[in-house]
Image: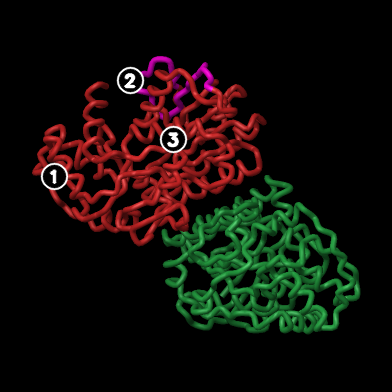
Chain colours: A green, B red
Amino acid sequence: MKIVITGGAGFLGRKLAARLTKQGFLWDRTGKKTGITGLVLADVAAVDPPIEGATAVVGDIADPHFMAGLIGEDVDTVFHLAAVVSGQAEAEFDVGMRVNLDATRALIERLRSLGTRPRLIFSSTLAVYGNTGGGISPSTPVTPLSSYGTQKAMNELLIGDMTRKGFIDGRSLRLPTVVIRPGKPNLAASSFASSILREPLSGERTACPVAKDLRVLIISPRRVIDAFVHTCELPAETFAGRGPVNLPGLSLTVGDMVEGLERAGGDSSLIEWTPDANIQRIVDTWPGTSDTRDAEDLGYLAETGIDDLIAAYLEDERRE
Amino acid sequence: MKIVITGGAGFLGRKLAARLTKQGFLWDRTGKKTGITGLVLADVAAVDPPIEGATAVVGDIADPHFMAGLIGEDVDTVFHLAAVVSGQAEAEFDVGMRVNLDATRALIERLRSLGTRPRLIFSSTLAVYGNTGGGISPSTPVTPLSSYGTQKAMNELLIGDMTRKGFIDGRSLRLPTVVIRPGKPNLAASSFASSILREPLSGERTACPVAKDLRVLIISPRRVIDAFVHTCELPAETFAGRGPVNLPGLSLTVGDMVEGLERAGGDSSLIEWTPDANIQRIVDTWPGTSDTRDAEDLGYLAETGIDDLIAAYLEDERRE
């Protein structure tokens, strides 16, 4: 079985690749454990450090020539993680449209052209919801209030229809905010959610642009990777008959997260509270709670708590 | 004020053009009644018969050259009615994508490029809903089960985001099945809903592919035109702060429609009941009832009943 990960140089792409190379197999579309014979990580940047057992290719999936070379006839499964993040998609509308919408469509069309109904696991987002008044469930209407959320929602619709038509075997997962992202802050409006834990855990100062009582929905990198892999265990019929899966997350206030930081030995006085009305306005439209019993019934794992989430981060990032 | 109607040779496009030329004015974006100085009907076919006071141009809005010529800097308002209907969009997926999705996006991008934030009234459809279990309201999630509904839903999202960004002043209306369409049956799965009234009213035979107890949501051409025009009376803020408007319709069973036919003097024995499992399967996913109190609060008019709907058809089509 040959697998491609777009956005393969990103932190989730690398973690997924590491999991897959370690595991060595994946469930094929008939439910059989099948050995992984090839794993290709595609990204605009090099995979650094390289991952043993995976081949990295550098290019732009919005480029049809690169896409044609990337997705050969032997590709069975694609994890589509490549995207321009929310802050950049908002600031540079046309870049977001090109990467988040057009490249995804080109990928789906390429997969369709193979005629083998390949599997596409699509990394979507809870940012498809906006101004829900706090809580969501799978029956909450999609009303994005960002270009990022709009582009992801459009992709979900297209993937759903192409799957219904039998062109591909598409499976969309909506991710809560992933915490703790390693590395540096990025252009996502949600960047603070990692920074307020990550920086103090390293003894560094950080600024928090939102209020302590803001309720956020977060998911750990481990649970995201679990979900990507578990999605391949489920039969195609599970996804053909339903919309995207809202992945379970932790519903916490920013204050709850800071208390977790302190219990883990982090110094919360390193957080400078510098309200940013623009960011607060964006995050206020995000859902703070999510009813995901349907996802749990499908076998997607819930988080156990902020303490475990922080402990897993320390374990994973010290190991890397 | 210069106005463009895409799909201007279609029966709704022609009716809208006739209304606008008769009315002579439209509300501009500041709420002022403004004289119509130009009305252009764009379509792949000629407008037949021509409409006095309107200019017809023949071309494909998916062609960028045609689009650039069609939408000049002086265009203030576009009614976007052009579309490949549901049956064809299902049978010819790529044609549907090109006309329903790509051409709409090209139109929006062209409007955006003018820098004047032009007004775009988009003709969407209740086919964005699928398998809702019968009833819908504005808070029902969008889950299309047709390529036509998918493409329209994607457009709604894009128009919503481009409006939020201030690129255009977009306003989307979701139409129930329009009944009675004049002329011949078309490739829409809903074609029967007009045929079972229109053909017997002309003393002609017709086949009905669905069961008598199927509940459908229908809207008269007059109410659609009322809605298009009324949409221009509403301030931009009304649409910037909300999603598409589900237009009020009549919720009737096919049997109710046949009883209306008989009351209007039509001979219902001209209807041959020839069940078609494919069409029945499609229409079974459509909503049969719709809570549209929010639309009525915005001033969109409800239907008065099947008898008035048939009487209006006879009056309008005899006059033309």
Residue that badge 1 annotates:
B271
State the separation of the CA atoms marked 2 and 3.
Answer: 18 Å
Q: Helix, strand, or loop for circle 2? A: loop
Residue A315 left/right relative to A35: right
Residue B311: name its quadrant. Answer: top left
The region drawn magenta spans B33-56
Residues at discs 2 and 3 both on one chain: yes
Residue lying at the far front of the rendered structure: B297
Residue A287 rendering spot, x and y as whole percentages: 62, 63
State the separation of the CA atoms marked 2 and 1.
Answer: 30 Å
Q: Earlier in the sequence, mark 2 or mark 3?
A: 2
**Which one is in front, A3 or B243?**
B243
Residue that badge 3 annotates:
B81
Q: What residue is drawn where x is 74% and y is 75%? A: A256
Which amino acid, by three-letter code, is at mark 2? Pro
Residue that badge 2 annotates:
B49
Q: Helix, strand, or loop for circle 1? A: strand
Chain of the residue where label 1 is placed in the rendered structure: B
Residue B121 left/right relative to B190: right
Chain of the residue where label 2 is placed in the rendered structure: B
Residue B237 rendering spot, x and y as whole percentages: 59, 39
Residue B277 rendering spot, x and y as whole percentages: 24, 58
